[in-house]
Amino acid sequence: MIKVLLVDDQQLLRMGFRMILDAEDDMTVVGEAGDGRAGVGMASALKPDIVLMDVRMPGMDGISATEAILKADPSARVLILTTFDVDEYVYAGLRAGASGFLLKDAPTDELIGAIRTVAGGESVLAPTTTTRLISRLVTLLPPDRHDAGEGRTSRDAAAGLTDREREVFLLVAAARSNREIAQELHLSEGTVKIHVGRILAKLDLRDRVQAVVLAYESGLVVPDRA
């Protein structure tokens, strides 16, 4: 059973999500929080498999709450809820370690599928809307991001990767699924999965979302080429 915690300041929206999720045989909503601070406390107490996190909330916002949850429990999985008018907040959420994001008006099957995907240890990066939004997010990066001391250069990001791993890394950064990567590189899906695991280990990344963020921040991928 996938345990879900809802964190959103809109009660009607939480009610709608609860009705949808509780109708699934393999999901249950274990709690609801109306702001980020309450969400952090409930995440610690309830240990949900997935936290469905809104961005804009009174008091502690969703970005700060995501950071706090993942600092307390690095294995936690957070899905950011957003609309297109809060791009900068979504990007901050991905950097904070969220496992992906969903649009608030996403179809029910997309919401259910995303929760199952993240609960299975993967990240939500496949939809075309996600690819387009990530491309928009990176335009928010300051031009001197490599001089800030926090990011990595493209050489740093690729250091230690084999030529094949670099190819796979770039396709992961372009939001390709394992199946799509396998077809493009004429590999089996199992081989691609092994490559992805090695890439994440070598670059000290927790999931594919962080791989995307790193690829853009380091300059390995730029929006107009993605």
Image: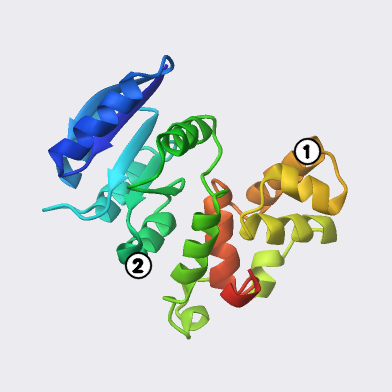
How many badges with numbers are in the image?
2
Q: Quadrant of the N terminus?
A: top left
Amino acid type, mark 1: Glu
Find numbered disc 2 in the image and state the secondary structure of the residue it sits on: helix
Q: Is residue 175 visible?
A: yes
Q: Could you say where residue 62 lies in the image, as x and y percent from the top left? A: 26, 51
Residue at the image position 66 percent from the left and 52 percent from the top: 176
Q: Residues within 10 Å of mark 1 (few under 14, many from 20)?
A: some
Q: Which of the two residues, 205 or 33, is positioned nearer the viewer here?
A: 33
Q: Answer above or below: position of 196 versus 144.
A: above
Find numbered disc 1 in the image and state the secondary structure of the residue it sits on: helix
Q: Answer above or below: position of 152 versus 188.
A: below
Q: Which of the two residues, 114 or 48, is positioned nearer the viewer here?
A: 114
Residue at the image position 70 percent from the left and 62 percent from the top: 170
Q: Residue furthest right?
A: 186
Figure colour scheme: rainbow
Q: Which of the two residues, 186 or 97, is positioned nearer the viewer here?
A: 186
| Residue that badge 1 annotates | 189
Residue at the image position 86 percent from the left and 44 percent from the top: 187
